[in-house]
């Protein structure tokens, strides 16, 4: 299969990130969009990319979708913990821990947008919101920003920190092996891996290191004070079980064994549990980091003749190491 490399100016990252966020990228109309596969080989007219005007429009800040996402995520956390407290059963608490893990992951996804300065027009407000999303789940914002810039700059190369991390295991993967890894995480066997990831995302300074270590426990104490001690315990347990399981599955679905980034779609259940806030539009994010999460679906809709796979097809192709995306 012949692949085409997207020009580097189509994906501004690294040291050029700040300029990118204020000046959305121009896109070549002759570039082959991610998701193009063998069925498009030989066609003379490649599907068009987003125009500069389209990227500019989709990159505009709107705080209302961010506020709704924050209210939704924290609201689900409170509802799940309240329901488990009222039910007072082991199974209710297990379900609550899974649901809380989905929202911890969703908050981390929002923090990722904040790292790209997409949560608020004001840089100071953006940084505060980012910290409020990431610190409760133990992620140092500035440390993650440096980690993530390397990921964009060195996507799918030996210098890509996400490829180097054990969250993205090497070798043949199948739906069964991925499911077993996630199940092990849910049972608490992935906690050492979480600690390793936290060590790799090096905090920017001592203050950030301390905050990333204590804010998850402060969050647990506040939840325990409001809803009872089991609610606080559930927050910490979710961080070391369901959060990590979801984080692992989502990370595998993005780049493992792909030429660049997998292009797929998923339904409402998948979007709630595994791919919140349009993370299933990850290829669009790598092409245009200036587009916030609430406009990524619109960015995908602007493509023509796209080959969008189901998550089942992606897992199958991960197992056979067949990449379809040409995004770099």
Image (cartoon, rainbow, N blue to C red):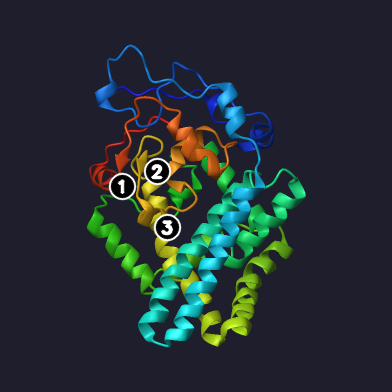
Q: Position of residue 279 (x, y in %)?
A: 46, 47
Q: Quadrant of residue 90?
A: bottom left
Q: Which residue is mark 1?
A: 311
Dot 3, how many residues are within 10 Å of its Cα: few (below 14), some (14-19), or many (20+)? some
SS for dot 2 = helix
How far apart are the alpha carbons under marks 3 and 1?
Answer: 14 Å
Label placed on residue 272:
3
The Cα–Cα distance between marks 1 and 2, rounded to whole angstroms, is 13 Å
Q: For marks 3 and 1, give the one nearer the viewer.
A: 3
Residue shown at the point (48%, 69%) measured from the top left: 100
**Image side of residue 308 versus residue 127, left or right:** left
- Are the residues tagged 2 and 3 within 8 Å (C-beta)? no
- Judging from the image, what secondary structure is the residue with disc 3 in? helix
Mark number displayed over residue 230: none
Residue indicated by mark 2:
255
Decide which of 109, 174 is in the foreground and name it: 109
Disc 1 crowd rating (10 Å Cα; few below 14, some 14-19, many 20+) is some
Choose the circle earlier in sequence order: 2 or 3.
Answer: 2
Pick whichever, 82 or 109, lies toward us.
82
Q: Tell me where residue 228 appears, x and y as whole percent.
A: 56, 86
Query: Is disc 1 in contact with disc 2, using a CB cutoff of under 8 Å?
Result: no
Q: Residues within 10 Å of mark 2 (few under 14, many from 20)?
A: many
> Height in image: 94 above or below 322?
below
Q: Position of residue 210 (x, y in %)?
A: 69, 69
């Amino acid at each position: 299969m012949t692949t085409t490399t997207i020009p580097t100016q189509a994906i501004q990252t690294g040291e050029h990130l700040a300029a990118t966020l204020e000046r959305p990228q121009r896109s070549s109309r002759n570039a082959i969009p991610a998701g193009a596969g063998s069925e498009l080989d030989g066609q003379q007219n490649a599907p068009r990319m987003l125009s500069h005007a389209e990227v500019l429009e989709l990159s505009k800040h709107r705080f209302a979708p961010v506020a709704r996402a924050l209210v939704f995520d924290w609201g689900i956390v409170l509802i799940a913990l309240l329901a488990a407290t009222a039910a007072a059963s082991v199974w209710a608490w297990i379900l609550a821990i899974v649901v809380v893990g989905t929202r911890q992951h969703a908050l981390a996804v929002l923090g990722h947008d904040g790292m790209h300065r997409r949560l608020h027009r004001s840089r100071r407000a953006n940084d505060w919101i980012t910290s409020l999303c990431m610190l409760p789940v133990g992620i140092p914002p500035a440390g993650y920003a440096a980690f993530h810039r390397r990921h964009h700059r060195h996507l799918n190369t030996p210098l890509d920190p996400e490829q180097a991390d054990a969250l993205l295991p090497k070798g043949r993967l199948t739906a069964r092996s991925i499911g077993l890894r996630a199940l092990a995480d849910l049972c608490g066997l992935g906690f050492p891996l979480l600690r390793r990831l936290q060590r790799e995302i090096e905090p920017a300074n001592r203050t950030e290191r301390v905050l990333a270590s204590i804010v998850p426990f402060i969050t647990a104490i506040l939840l325990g004070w409001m809803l009872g001690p089991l609610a606080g315990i559930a927050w910490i347990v979710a961080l070391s079980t369901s959060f990590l399981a979801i984080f692992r599955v989502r990370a595998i679905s993005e780049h493992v064994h792909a030429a660049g980034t997998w292009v797929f779609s998923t339904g409402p259940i998948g979007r709630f549990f595994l791919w919140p806030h349009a993370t299933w539009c990850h290829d669009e994010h790598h092409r245009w980091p200036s587009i916030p999460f609430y406009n990524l679906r619109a960015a995908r809709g602007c493509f023509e003749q796209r080959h969008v796979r189901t998550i089942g097809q992606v897992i199958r192709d991960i197992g056979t190491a067949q990449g379809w995306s040409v995004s770099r």
